[in-house]
Image (cartoon, helix red, strand yellow):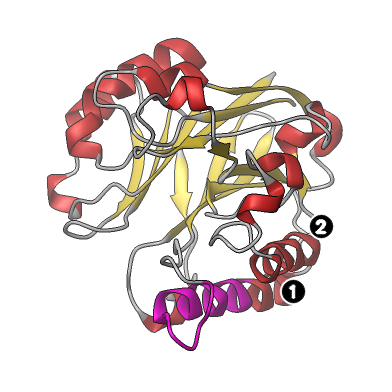
Amino acid sequence: MSFRVATWNINSVRLRAPLLADVVAQLAPDVLCLQETKTPDEFFPHDAAEALGFSHRVVRGMKGYNGVAILSRLPITLRPGEPDWCERGDCRHIGVDVQHPSGPIEVHDFYIPAGGDEPDREINPKFGHKLDFLAEVTRWQAGRGPARRAVLVGDLNIAPLEQDVWSHKALLKVVSHTPVEVAALNAWQAAGAWVDAPRHFVPASEKLYSWWSYRARDWAAADRGRRLDHVWVSEDLSPKLAGYEILKSARGWTQASDHVPVLVELAL
């Protein structure tokens, strides 16, 4: 009995709603978590999601920025009482309980602040917000203890390992791979005893990316990627890890997002 969960920073769900069908055809997820939906809830393309078999949906969006959504073939229940991170109301997290035949599975969908260009909170408030967000979510996680029968996904906007970026040396002072960000992400992961699911299959010594900049003239030839999109599973689910896929071909689709979908399969 499998459970297939995918995450994708879609970079505008209304613009790229037609691509959802391609993601479903390639990955066949039971649950699809989106980030950067960039639309108020009333304008979310529910018809497109319904047509693809996602009869259960929770969306949390705002005009032009941020936004997350969880689309599911299985019944889901919104988890009540989750924090308003940094008291900004900026639509960066949804937590749900998925009613899988093997039992409930807790699923969290996060969109972590990108952090701007300068890795210095004194001159760049966006970087300060990112660090504050990570500190708050780590305290929240520590208060809950190790995750149990849970999956956490999203655009976490940090590439933690040396082989998660095209050049460790070149990006050490670039937001998304700085030591302070990596330490913050590692603290969050440790607080929940989360397991990095794709790296369960791919050794840390091998390159692995999920994002390629729009700035590259030929993204595929340059291949200067970063792994910003993550799937973590609780330790009790890690023995059930059955497969993963990073849909690199999606970066070459017409009107592509700069992120590609990442899928993990559990055999429950």
Secondary element under disc 2, as helix, strand or loop, is loop
Q: Is residue 28 visible?
A: no
Q: Residue furthest left?
A: 43
Q: Which residue is mark 1?
A: 142
Front residue (pair 209, 132): 209
- The magenta region covers 119-137
Q: Is residue 132 magenta?
A: yes
Please give the residue where the numbered disc 2 appears in the rendered image: 193
Q: Kindly identify the amino acid type of the residue bearing the numbered disc 2.
A: Ala
Q: Of residues 253 and 146, which is closer to you in this image?
A: 253
Above-or-below relation of 239 to 36 = above
Mark closest to the chain's N terminus, 2 or 1: 1
**At 31% from the left edge and 42% from the top edge, which residue is drawn?**
11
Residue 177 rendering spot, x and y as whole percentages: 63, 57
Residue at the top extreme, as displayed: 25
Residue drawn at point x = 50 percent, y = 17 percent: 27
Q: Residue at x 55, y 60 (%)?
A: 174
Q: Is residue 62 visible?
A: yes
Q: Which secondary structure lies at badge 1?
A: helix
The stretch drawn in magenta includes residue 199: no
Q: Is residue 36 above or below residue 71?
A: below
Q: Quadrant of the C terminus?
A: top right
Other residues around mark 2 within 10 Å, as few (<14) / some (14–19) / many (≥20): many
At label 1, which amino acid type do we have? Answer: Ala
Residue 234 % position (x, y)? 76, 48
CA–CA distance in space, label 2 to label 1:
10 Å
